[in-house]
Image: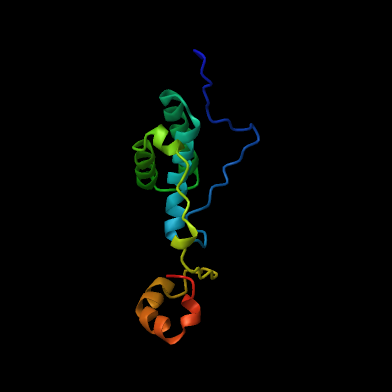
Amino acid sequence: ENGRIETDLYRKPTDRNKYLLLDSCHPGSQVKNIPFSQFLRINRICSKVEWRDAQYLKMKMLFLERKYPAGMIDSAMKRARAIPREKALEPSKAKTTTQRRPVLAVTWDPRFPSLQAINKKHWRSMKTSDQRCFQNHH
């Protein structure tokens, strides 16, 4: 249109609503960020505001079908809408190797105690007792 390529979100006719259920065994923050990331994705893909808004409504219905609270969905939509498309399209700034932190990867279960709280409580003693854990990670 007018020498520009316009883009809209396309869904295959066979597309199924498989967004993660709220009661799944995933951290709450992860579940809460799914609607925001999907609305932000729409923001990136749809080049026209009217197409974006139509896709937002379709996405909202998909999340409502999966029993996401309307307030959570509306909040995520509002956050995504507040980000200008030009800003959303900018590549993310990857961390340099000097900014990387050590990673502890564990299986998550809601019955486990908070690893973040345990780590925070024992951080100083871990750091002073075993320097091998912190080599090359300043």
In the rendered image, the quadrant that contains the C terminus is: bottom left
Q: Quadrant of residue 17?
A: top right
Q: Residue at x 46, y 76 (%)?
A: 134
Which percent across, then down, holds residue 67?
A: 46, 48
Colour setup of the view: rainbow
Along the viewing direction, whichever of 66 and 20 lies nearer the viewer: 20
Q: Residue at x 53, y 21 (%)?
A: 5
Q: Residue at x 49, y 69 (%)?
A: 102
Which percent across, then down, holds residue 1?
A: 51, 14
Q: Residue at x 35, y 45 (%)?
A: 71
Q: Is residue 98 above or below residue 85?
A: below
Report the residue that reaches farthest toward the right: 14
Q: Quadrant of residue 12?
A: top right
In the rendered picture of this protein, how many numbered marks are placed on residues? 0
Along the viewing direction, whichever of 129 and 111 lies nearer the viewer: 129
Which percent across, then down, holds residue 90?
A: 45, 38
Along the viewing direction, whichever of 95 and 75 lies nearer the viewer: 95
Report the residue that reaches farthest toward the bottom: 129
Which percent across, then down, holds residue 80?
A: 39, 40
Q: Is 15 on the left or on the right of 2, as rendered?
A: right
Q: Is 82 on the left or on the right of 88, as rendered?
A: left
